[in-house]
Image (tube, grey):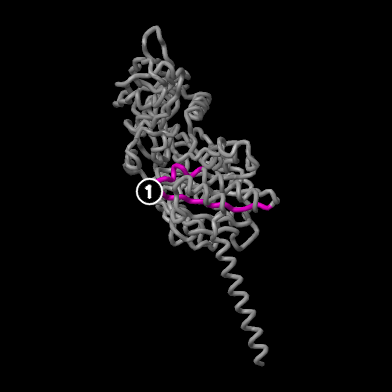
Amino acid sequence: MGSGVRKMKKSVLFLLLGGCFASVWAQRLPTEVQQAMRLADIPASATAILVQEVNSRSPKLSVNVHKSFNPASTMKLITTGAALDLLGPSYTWKTQAYITGEMRGDVLRGDLIFKGSGDPKFVSENLWHFLRQIRAKGIRDIRGDILLDRGAMATKSFDASEFDGAPEKAYNAGPDALLLNFKAVKLQFSPDGTIGKARVAVDPPLEDFSIDMPALSNEECNGWQKKLELGVNSSGVGFSGTYDSTCGEQSWFVHAYWISNDQYFGAAFKQIWRDIGGSFGGEVKSGSSPASATLFAEWISPPLTDIVRDINKFSNNVMARQLLVTLGMDPQGQPATAQRGARAIQHWLAEKRIAAPELVIENGSGLSRTEKISAATMGKLLSVMWRSPRMPEFVASLPITSHDGSMRKRLNDTEVAGRGHIKTGGLRGVRTIAGYMLAASGKRYIVVHFINHPNAGEGNIVHDALLQWVYENG
């Protein structure tokens, strides 16, 4: 008996020591990563790293994985992963046109109502085609009003300057059941030396939208947007600064925060409707669809698969906000909210047996100072999605190293090029990556790396060193 007990004790001790050694090894940072961190002046305490083979239950590398971090745009993986599973890849949004009153020939003696459901990508080209469809079905002259039914999503005041004090940034548009063109205008600048000014074209064309052309200067083309000194008012935009002639033609996407959603939609509608031969003399205003209204036409969005690809490849914050609110749609018909969408994600994670007590979801895009997640939770999400029937759509939505999206200019001319599907994230003081990496061995790894530190702006070299290490050693 004594000999058996001693053997059992030795076995237990061996297992315990083996577990300790494995833990220590998993916590040790690779030399290449340590060197990159020293070069970037980022301490290990400000990072979280998880590297784990997709079919393994234990990590190859694990550092601070249970610590809560700001994930920046990698938060979009939580939102899009849940959406693909809960809504399905073929899910679409409908924008519907209803009419009241009666038709007499090509004259509508009543209201035309647009009812939105939160389409994240209802752009001006779509509105043009939709209005052409309405014209083709017989309406030319509208003798009532245009009513905008946004009841699918809760309407509340949205402060576009709250995040970073830059309301003109296109990413600062808020969610809207009838969001049109991300509520942005594209300003196209073309210097014209004959008049000493830069000509400015606006897209989409907006009725009664005025533009004061900026004067030209001969300075170097550095920080040209800031030099323009954009000014806005209810009727358009102007510039108190100058445009550098050396810049040539440039484009600037600006969030039209200075006008209401109704005003933006109305200006686009009136211009397009007139351009396609329609007439209208009423008001454009918010309203709900009465029970007596008749469905006249319908526009269907691209499928969710395409929306998720745009969100993840190009890190579209406005579309991610829209998607989170969509997840908050109430079967009972109550207006959807971001808070309800966040609860839907929490319930979904619980169903997938992912405990995430540290998770904080504000808008689902990562454009936030309050959103939090751990590398462990992100890794579990990536593991669940790898085993999910939605895996092909999810993985295909991620940027490919050195090829496209936010990874297009990363790791070019290296062995890692084309072997990683990696979502990136960046805010002031935050740099993050999360996704999948195909190693030289043929094994595929989940990779999560969060950096929250004042020097995080230098963090890309650390991320790249980690991805190179996974490729070589995985």
Residue at (45% x, 59% y) in the render:
67
Give the image location of residue 29, x and y in percent. 54, 56
Tell whether position 453 is magenta: yes
Magenta segment boundaries in residue numbering: 443-460
Residue occupying the far right of the picture:
442
Q: Quadrant of residue 228?
A: top left
Observer-nearest residue: 133 or 419?
Answer: 419
Count neighbours of disc 1 (C-alpha within 10 A) and say few if under 14, some if 14 to 19, many if 20 or more.
Answer: some
Q: Is residue 318 visible?
A: yes
Q: Is residue 343 visible?
A: no
Tell whether position 290 is magenta: no
Tag count: 1
Q: Is residue 325 above or below residue 129?
A: below
Observer-nearest residue: 448 or 386?
Answer: 448
Give the image location of residue 470, x and y in percent. 61, 51
Residue at the disc numbered 1: 369
Q: Is residue 12 above or below residue 194?
A: below
Give the image location of residue 229, x and y in percent. 32, 25
Please indicate whether residue 169 sits to the left or right of residue 473 in the image. Answer: left
Residue at (42% x, 54% y) in the render:
372
Residue occupying the far top of the picture:
194
Observer-nearest residue: 76 or 409?
Answer: 409
Give the image location of residue 241, x and y in percent. 31, 21
Residue at (59% x, 70% y) in the render:
19
Q: Secondary structure at mark 1?
A: loop
Observer-nearest residue: 51 or 332?
Answer: 51
